[in-house]
Image (cartoon, rainbow, N blue to C red):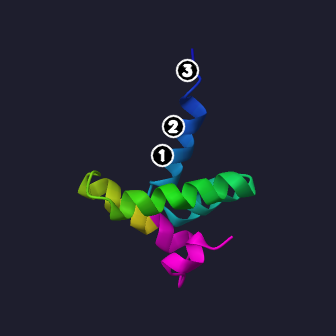
Amino acid sequence: MSSPDEPLELIWDGLLSRETDQIRAVFAALDPASQRSVLLHLRRMALEPDWLPVQQQSAQFALDTLLPGMGEDDLLRD
């Protein structure tokens, strides 16, 4: 039996996988509002000290994959 959280867990597993193709595929399947939420959460994960180093590294890898060459200002812009 699957739990209601399973799809969300699969999404985050994909986003934090450090596998470029998987990260892009999972992200592309999200609607624009969810994509923005994911990007903001990944940014928090990469920058805030409350996350484990491996989580911070995976979040930064995902951001680098999804937003090559973009800075924080680009991420926060509507």
Question: Which quadrant of the structure image shows residue 49?
Answer: bottom left
Question: What residue is pinned by disc 2?
Answer: 9
Real-space CA distance between mark 2 and mark 3, rounded to the nearest whole angstrom:
10 Å
Q: Give the quarter of the figure containing the C terminus.
A: bottom right
Q: Is residue 43 above or below residue 26?
A: below
* Labelled pair 2, 3 in contact (Cβ < 8 Å): no
Of the numbered discs 2 and 3, the one sitting upstream in the chain is 3
Asked whether residue 29 appears in the rendered view, the answer is no
Locate residue 75, reporting x and y percent. 57, 72
Of the numbered discs 3 and 1, the one sitting upstream in the chain is 3
Q: Is residue 77 magenta?
A: yes
Question: What residue is pinned by disc 1?
Answer: 13
Residue name at image x 57 percent, y 14 percent: 1
Locate residue 22, reporting x and y percent. 57, 57
Q: Is residue 18 above or below residue 64?
A: above
Q: For the residue marked with disc 2, what is the amino acid?
A: Glu
Specify start and end residues of the magenta stretch as a single range: 62-78
- Helix, strand or loop status at disc 3: loop
Real-space CA distance between mark 2 and mark 1, rounded to the nearest whole angstrom:
6 Å
